[in-house]
């Protein structure tokens, strides 16, 4: 049951990157994250859904155009921590960013996110 809750929270978090309208980002994040979520991203530590929303909106506004974020691995959840791999690709085969997120869950919601992003590479088709 914990793995199912983790998968659901993670997939809802990822859907915030792919929603058709920026106005839906906060709603999706509030369905996946605790209000006091701690986010360890490429620029350091921040707290709260508003900070995660800022990060998501920055990714969505990539100079190459809005892209697509997908989970490209199963969710591995040995305990209350889970990890998964993701890929972000911009339109027309633009820059590709890949990485692994490690998340901690509390009551079925993500309360900590640690992002390990890899090199930006051109996508191969």
Image (cartoon, rainbow, N blue to C red):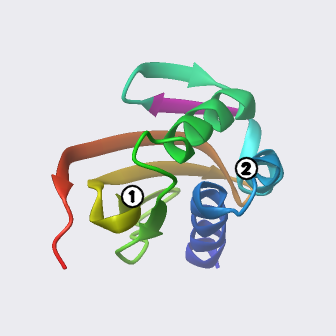
Left or right for 5, reference 84: right
The quarter of the picture where residue 90 lies is bottom left
Residue situated in front as seen by the camera: 111 or 78: 111
Q: Is residue 38 magenta?
A: yes
Residue at mark 2? 29
Q: Is residue 119 magenta?
A: no
Q: Position of residue 63 (x, y in %)?
A: 43, 39
- Element at badge 2? helix
Answer whether residue 85 is visible to the viewer in this image: no
Residue at image point 54% right, 41% down: 61
Q: Which mark is residue 90?
A: 1
Q: Nearer the viewer, mark 2 or mark 1?
A: 1
Q: Which residues are magenta?
A: 36-40
Distance from Cα at disc 2 to Cα at disc 1:
21 Å
The quarter of the picture where residue 74 lies is bottom left
Q: Is residue 85 above or below residue 113?
A: below
Query: Which quarter of the rendered picture does the C terminus lie within?
Result: bottom left
Residue situated in front as seen by the camera: 60 or 113: 60
Residue at image point 36% right, 74% down: 72
Q: Is residue 41 above or below residue 69?
A: above
Residue at image point 29% right, 53% down: 99
Query: Which quarter of the rendered picture does the N terminus lie within?
Result: bottom right
Answer whether residue 88 is visible to the viewer in this image: yes
Near mark 1 (Cα within 10 A), the count class, few <14, some 14-19 or many ≥20, is many
Q: Is residue 96 above or below residue 51?
A: below
Q: Which mark is residue 120?
A: none
């Amino acid at each position: 049951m914990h793995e199912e809750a983790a998968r659901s929270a993670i997939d809802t978090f990822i859907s915030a990157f792919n929603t058709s309208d920026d106005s839906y980002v906060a709603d999706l994040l509030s369905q996946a994250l605790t209000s006091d979520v701690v986010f360890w991203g490429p620029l350091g530590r921040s707290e709260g859904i508003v900070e995660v929303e800022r990060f998501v909106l920055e990714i969505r506004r990539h100079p190459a155009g809005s892209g697509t974020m997908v989970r490209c691995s199963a969710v591995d959840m040995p305990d209350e921590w889970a990890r998964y791999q993701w890929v972000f690709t911009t339109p027309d085969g633009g820059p590709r960013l890949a990485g692994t997120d490690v998340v901690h869950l509390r009551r079925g919601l993500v309360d900590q996110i640690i992002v390990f992003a890899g090199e930006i590479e051109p996508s191969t088709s």
